[in-house]
Amino acid sequence: MKTINLSSSGTTPAENSAVRYLNQYRCPYCQTEWEDVWDCGCNDRCPDCNKEIEPYESGLIAGDSAETELPYDGPSLANAMPEVLGKPALEIQS
């Protein structure tokens, strides 16, 4: 199995501490197996035949957390009626 390690040069400390996943791939065309680290479970190109391959397994790397902090801890108000937000409803004039 090949391991592809991408250099972290040119990245900020915040980018280096982001959530990371170990993705494992097996190419059905040329039978090459490899693993790679990404910030999500995503497709990759086979290093031998360049076909786009989905990971057969993707796991969170130990020590990282998938939890994120939300800027607002309450319920979403994106689709709330204006009255709920304390604003008058719009009147439609013809």
Image (cartoon, rainbow, N blue to C red):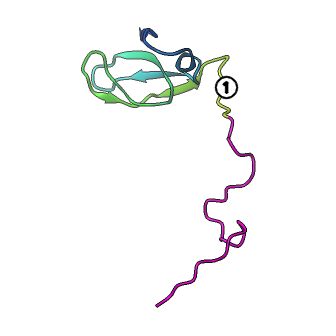
- On screen, residue 74 versus residue 29, left or right, reads right
Give the magenta-colored segment's residue range.
69-94
Residue at position x 33%, y 26% in the image: 28
Q: Nearer the viewer, residue 3 or 88?
A: 88
**Where is 66 relative to 72, above or below?**
above
Q: Is residue 94 visible to us here?
A: yes
> Residue at coordinates 57% horizontally, 83% vertically from top-left?
91
Q: Position of residue 73 (x, y in %)?
A: 74, 46
Numbered disc 1: secondary structure: loop
Crowding near the residue tagged with mark 1, few <14, some 14–19, many ≥20 C-alpha atoms within 10 Å: few
In-front residue for pair 47/87: 87
Q: Tell me: 52 left or right of 59.
A: left
- Left or right of 5? Residue 46 is left
Asked if 66 appears above or below 7 in the picture, the reply is below
Residue 27 lies in quadrant: top left
Residue drawn where x is 68% and y is 32% of the image: 67
Residue at the extreme right of the image, as rendered: 74
Determine the main secondary structure of the stretch shown in magenta: loop
Residue lying at the far left in this picture: please name it: 49
The location of residue 52, given as percent across then percent down, is 31, 29
- Viewer can see residue 1: no
Using the image, determine if residue 57 lies above or below residue 17. below
Quarter of the view holding residue 63: top right
| Quarter of the N terminus within the rendering | top left
- 30 vs 20, left or right, is left
Q: Amino acid at mark 1?
A: Ser
- Per the image, the residue denoted by label 1 is 65
- Front-lying residue, 13 or 40: 13
What is the x, y in percent for residue 56? 47, 28
Residue ID at (28%, 25%): 29
